[in-house]
Amino acid sequence: MPFLGQDWRSPGQSWVKTEDGWKKTTKDDNETNNNVLERKSYCKEEHDKENLILSINYDVAAKKRKKDLPNNNTKIPYFYKDKWIYVHKGSTKERHGYCTLGEAFNRLDFCSAIKDTRRFNYVVRLLELIAKSQLPSLSGVAQKNYMNILERVVQKVLDDQQNVRPIKELLQTLYASLCSLVQDMGKSVLVGNINIWVHRMENILQWQQQLDNIQINRPKNTGMTLLELPVSLQLNIMQRLSDGRDLVSLGQVCPDLSMLTEDRLLWKKLCQYHFTDRQIRKRLMVSDKGQLEWKKMYFKLCRCYPHKEQYSDTLQFCTHCHILFWKDTDHPCTANNPESCCKAVSPQGFINLFKF
């Protein structure tokens, strides 16, 4: 406990360390020490003024460089690499404040997630949803981290030559959103200088150009191709495609595949997979021969209703301890049966968790 004098408003007693130990100073000793300190400080004052003038510019510049170093180094993502985060929506005795979308986006390890094939489409869909409506709600660090992760996604697509179309659509969505947001900079909808965002928009255009110029290289190994397989196996492979646009692209490869991609049963199963029976009945299209046009119905339903989303691996949310985590990582859960408390979180569900 700190020592208090007889009067609780007084500063207490003063002690000085000597060779024999600590010694309490009296009023006269205090005055003598103060006079000595004043003389020493007066002698140093003129010298300190010169050093201060010379060093003030250096100190300011050094502090500015130290402050701007993590901000200007855009090639390195945010340093948090947690596998889970506690989602709290209000202040309690144990925790103060609440968790935001930007904080969750910073702390969860999305950089490693894009390297995993099971999580790649999940992260891309999340980036697309954030680009559509949630970009202004992110903090400055989260917006910078968003662009860093997007750059890694584009680089991965350029290296692997896979998933080109989803990334093109993501970049188009992001560029259209930024065009509308930059025009509203007077409303402070984006964090940072407008020149930074103009530079980022130029990077997006450059990435789009690189994706347009990409050339898919044929594999060197001379194994069995898709055309050499039996027709039943070819149809079985086509039934595994969940996007009708992939079927259309596959049909443009050669005339034989084009005939198979027009199979009515193939498009019927695709419609039944993505849409409910009620939605299908509302958008029925019948040909002149009295047959249902499943291919036309599919694209018509896509314009009216959202696709069914299915991912190999997603984020998990524990309803018992309110922790958001990746599926293959453990979280500090206190429930007796943690697996029964966990549920999969879709990309839209991830955003809904932070809508207060």
Image: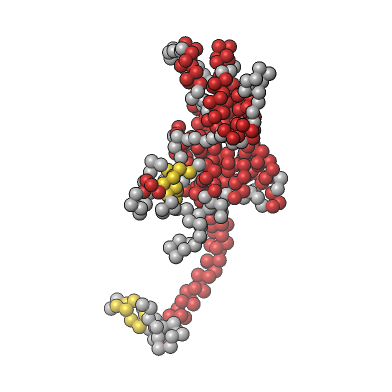
Residue name at image x 62 percent, y 20 percent? 291
Residue name at image x 49 percent, y 25 percent? 240
Vertical relation: 63 (above or below) 148:
below
| Nearer to us in this view, 180 or 63 | 180
Vertical relation: 354 (above or below) 35:
above
Q: Residue furthest left?
A: 20
Q: How is the image coloured?
A: secondary structure
Q: Residue furthest bottom?
A: 6
Q: Is residue 171 visible?
A: no
Residue name at image x 62 percent, y 48 percent? 136
Residue name at image x 65 percent, y 26 percent? 285
| Nearer to us in this view, 269 or 163 | 269
Q: Quadrant of residue 150?
A: top right
| Nearer to us in this view, 233 or 34 | 233
- Give the quadrant of the N terminus: bottom left
> Percent from the top left, x then y, of residue 113?
45, 38
> Percent from the top left, x then y, of residue 185?
69, 49
Vertical relation: 8 (above or below) 203:
below
> Percent from the top left, x then y, of residue 180?
69, 43
Q: Residue furthest front?
A: 290
- Give the quadrant of the C terminus: bottom right
> Percent from the top left, x then y, of residue 138?
57, 49
Q: How many marks on residues?
A: 0
Q: Is residue 5 visible?
A: yes
Q: Quadrant of residue 303?
A: top right
| Nearer to us in this view, 220 or 33 | 220
